Image: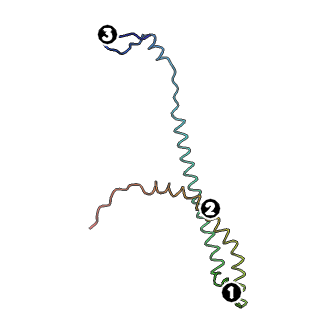
């Protein structure tokens, strides 16, 4: 098929029939598929990060709500553990506080889990929000 070009160059010369074969050959390269997969993966990652942030926000709200509901129960708990006598109102407040401790622990645990799951969002936000902005000119 290939022959020398009469000594002028060392590169092979293709016969016309070989050129016709190459021209008629069907080459199928689908570049859209990998690009689409990357874009879908990126969109899914962004959605996952945003959902993780929403869950984190919800757990922060719940944690703060429970903290407010039970109030500062620690001093009363310490007094109770030290064996101090408490008034009726203090005991009622302590009952409410102790009852809320399980909710506080659950809310704290949920918050820690959500915080861990939201960490990839921090990287994404760093990329999006810390773009290199043009330097500000000094204002006089």
Q: Which mark is residue 54?
A: none
Query: Is disc 1 placed on a helix, strand or loop?
Result: loop
| Sequence-first disc among 1 and 2 | 1
Residue located 46% across and 13% down the image: 20
Q: Is residue 85 left or right of residue 5?
A: right
Q: Is residue 103 above or below residue 129?
A: below
Residue located 36% across and 10% down the image: 4
* CA distance for labels 1 and 2: 34 Å
Q: Is residue 69 left or right of residue 35?
A: right
Q: Which residue is mark 2?
A: 113
Residue located 67% across and 86% down the image: 79
* CA distance for labels 3 and 2: 76 Å
Q: Which residue is mark 1?
A: 82
Q: Which residue is mark 3?
A: 7
**Of labels 1 and 2, the one closer to you:** 1
- In the rendered image, the quadrant that contains the N terminus is top left
Query: Is disc 2 placed on a helix, strand or loop?
Result: helix
Q: Is residue 114 above or below residue 80?
A: above
Q: Nearer the viewer, residue 117 or 52?
A: 117
Q: Is residue 19 left or right of residue 98?
A: left
Q: At which x and y percent is residue 50?
A: 56, 56
Query: Is disc 3 placed on a helix, strand or loop?
Result: loop
Q: At which x and y percent is residue 130?
A: 43, 57
Q: Is residue 78 left or right of residue 19?
A: right
Q: Is residue 20 above or below residue 32?
A: above
Residue found farthest to the top = 6
Q: At which x and y percent is residue 56?
A: 59, 62
Label 2 Cα crowd, 10 Å radius (few <14 / some 14-19 / many 20+):
some
Which quarter of the picture shows residue 36? top right
């Amino acid at each position: 098929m290939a022959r020398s070009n009469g000594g002028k160059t060392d590169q092979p010369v293709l016969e016309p029939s070989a050129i016709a074969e190459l021209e008629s050959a069907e080459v199928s390269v689908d570049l859209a598929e990998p690009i689409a997969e990357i874009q879908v993966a990126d969109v899914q990652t962004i959605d996952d990060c945003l959902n993780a942030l929403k869950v984190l926000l919800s757990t922060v709200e719940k944690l703060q709500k429970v903290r407010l509901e039970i109030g500062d129960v620690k001093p009363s708990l310490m007094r109770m553990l030290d064996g101090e006598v408490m008034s009726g109102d203090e005991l009622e407040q302590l009952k409410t506080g102790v009852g809320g401790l399980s909710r506080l622990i659950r809310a704290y645990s949920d918050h820690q889990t959500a915080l861990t799951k939201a960490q990839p969002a921090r990287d994404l936000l760093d990329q999006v929000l810390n773009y290199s902005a043009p330097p500000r000119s000094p204002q006089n």
